[in-house]
Image: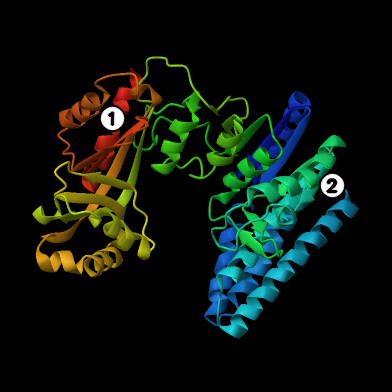
Amino acid sequence: MPLLVMKFGGTSVGDAAAIRSVAAITEAQRATWGQVALVVSAMSGVTDMLIRGATTAASGDQQTFRAMDRLLREKHAAALAELVSDERERADVSDQVFRLIDEFSMLCHSVAVLGELSPRAVDAISSLGERMSVRVVAAALRARGIPAEALDATGFVVTTAHFGDARPLQDVTRERTRAQVLPLLERGIVPVITGFIGATEQGVTTTLGRGGSDYSGAIIGAALDADEVDIYTDVDGVMTTDPRLSPDARVIPVLSYAEMGELAYFGAKVLHPRTIRPVVERGIPLRVRNTFNPSHPGTLVVQDVASNGQTVKAVTAIRNLSLITVEGRGMIGVPGVAARTFGAVASVGANVLMISQASSEQSICFVVPSNTVPQVTYALEHNLAMELARRDIDRIWARDDVAIITAVGAGMRETPGVAARVFGALAESQINVIAIAQGSSECSISTVVAASDCDAAVRAVHRLTQG
């Protein structure tokens, strides 16, 4: 029997009305597919409440987390009151949710006493939102006549102990997920699984990072060999660009894995950048859909897409960046400069979003988030002190207030002149290109422009998506 895994984000389960929509979608998809499994986020705003309670407790504040305790009880109780009419069922689920809120207050009290909030404690506290929401959503499904059971992914999504940004251990996760979830599916029960969280092999709770619920959906879908994974959000699909920047932005019907990966990396907000990796490895189609407009087919993401003559499919922008340049005539032919440059960047944990190097080897420039510039430049000056002293490197400097504009489309591979069209569109709008980069996959072209030109650059390149 075909299996559909659906992931619902925080806005999709934000209140009783939204959860009622989730239940209606589940009922319809179950009739179509036969077997469905849900992966859900915390109700919107809940994770922020949990983290606020924890961080204020660490500074000795024992009032804020108690206020959050009251708000959490009110929010979940209000949803259950609207969704579950059976008093015994409602009381039972409320008791489960309130015990989790008791755990939140107990953990926050401990944090306040210790005066310290460790990454492990943050994960334990922030995971509680998903653990509450799965119980509410499963109860809503049962109230609609759909057999459903809430499952904590800590029992089968096994991860590294990198708290706050854990990685799944694929083989053991696959084995345990199948052992726990498949028997429920075979009995006609809809599993409602916590997104965002997992546990180490020792059973210690971890999280996959903010936005990691999308990743959870793909991990579960891959482990179960699902026929499709649907990511439900509050937009109709992946857009050609941000509609706030270009009102003529459109939903893209079909994307390849490679195109979606480029979009996710270069700023598209619909998917977590790591989301597609598990489904790519299993060749599972992924679809992005709108919880609040379920009749819209959304965007389907598959292995390969037949060419339709459209070279540029979408345009993204990343802001709040700086361009760091390492330059010097003495760099020509000197081995190891690039390695030491990026070793220095890695040593301070900075993320390099784009690299460009002159063929003459006289300079290397790369883009990093602006808030990391002081640490990066200090590390570079320390690691390259010998080259600076010998004048092999003349200077290391940063240009602030830049943005990366990326044009994405697999059709670039077969079509000559795409780069010329992108640069021509920018030139027509009087936008100066500071640096460029194109990957060997030829699926995207990235340009660095001044932050003040960002919006105009997006609109200029977006016009290329229309033909």
Expressed as whole percent of the image width and height from the top left, the position of residue 111 reads 61, 78
Residue found 73% across the figure and 34% down from its top: 26
Residue type at mark 2 is Ser
Residue at image position (25%, 36%) is 457
Is 275 or 342 nearer to us in this picture? Answer: 342
The location of residue 303, given as percent across then percent down, is 53, 27
Which one is in front in this view, the residue at disc 2 or the one at disc 1? 1
Say above or below: 392 vs 113: above
Judge by depth and name the residue closer to the eye, 252 or 311: 311
Measuring from the top left, give residue 306's x and y in whole percent. Answer: 47, 17
Q: Name the residue carrying label 2.
A: 85
The numbered dot on residue 461 is 1
Q: Quadrant of residue 453?
A: top left
Which corner quadrant of the image does residue 37 belong to? top right
- Residue 19 visible? The answer is no
Quarter in which the C terminus is drawn: top left
Q: Please, what secondary structure does the residue beneath circle 1 have?
A: helix
Whether residue 42 is visible, yes or no, is yes
Q: Which mark is residue 48?
A: none
Q: Nearer the viewer, residue 172 or 151?
A: 172
Indicate which disc, 2 or 1, sits on the residue closer to the N terminus: 2
Q: How far apart are the two marked residues, 2 and 1, measured between alpha carbons?
A: 53 Å
The percent position of residue 295, horizontal first and vertical second, equals 62, 25
**Would you say 349 lies left or right of 136 here?**
left
